[in-house]
Amino acid sequence: MSKTTFSGPVRSEDTFKTVSKAASTGTITEVITLGDGPVTLGDEDKTLTNATHSGRLLVIPAITSNRTITLPSPVAGAHFKFIYGGAAEEAQNIIFDTGANANYFIGGVAHIQSDADSGSVYADGNSNSKLTLTDFGTTEINILAKDSTNWLVWGWSEGADAPAFGDQ
């Protein structure tokens, strides 16, 4: 693979995409898209793709029921940044799901408790493949594919109940 060096600004009238190419098959996989505006997720369960969601700000709207956001298979460098775009603390839960215990989270989330003490919660680093934000409010969660297996997670969430990591 060749490399190009630029001296000065690089301009695109659309977006920039980072891709990976499989050495054995030549298959191109989009890892991250830079330059597009935020994506507001709907009030439904959502399965993310690298091509549409990685590298973009993902806004979680007010929701009417518990919702699951399923991550794609990890590709090193894929990054998902979530913020809450609702107007009040939710009475429902958001669940971030890697799809399999083999694709577990590494890291933790700070909890800002709206009615008592605050603290942090951490994944067990060996099988926790779900992160649940219970009755959440203001939130920023970052999830980054460390490699083709695991996800790094960090951020914070405000609410009356602490977030929780768990297995499938």
Image: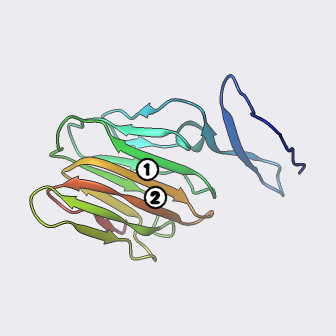
Comparing 98 with 77, the one in front is 77
- Considering every residue shown, the one lying at the far front of the view is 8
Quarter of the picture holding the C terminus? bottom left
**What residue is drawn where x is 40% and y is 41%?**
46
Q: Which residue is mark 2?
A: 99
Comparing 61 with 139, the one in front is 139
The picture places residue 37, in percent across and down from the top left corner, at 51, 29
The alpha-carbon separation of the residues under discs 2 and 1 comes to 7 Å
Asked if 86 appears above or below 148 in the picture, the reply is: above
Type of the residue with mark 2: Gly
**What residue is drawn where x is 56% and y is 55%?**
73
**What residue is drawn where x is 61% and y is 37%?**
34
Disc 2 to disc 1: CB gap under 8 Å: yes
- Image quarter of residue 36: top right
The picture places residue 121, in percent across and down from the top left corner, at 30, 70
The picture places residue 26, in percent across and down from the top left corner, at 83, 49
Near mark 1 (Cα within 10 A), the count class, few <14, some 14-19 or many ≥20, is some
Which comes before the other along the chain, label 2 or label 1? 1
**What residue is drawn where x is 35% and y is 32%?**
42
Type of the residue with mark 1: Thr
Residue 70 in the figure: left or right of residue 165? right
Asked if 105 appears above or below 92 in the picture, the reply is: below
- Considering every residue shown, the one lying at the far top of the view is 13
Q: Which residue is mark 1?
A: 70
Disc 1 on helix, strand or loop? strand
Asked if 165 appears above or below 133 in the picture, the reply is: below
Picture mark count = 2
- Considering every residue shown, the one lying at the far right of the view is 2
Disc 2 on helix, strand or loop? loop
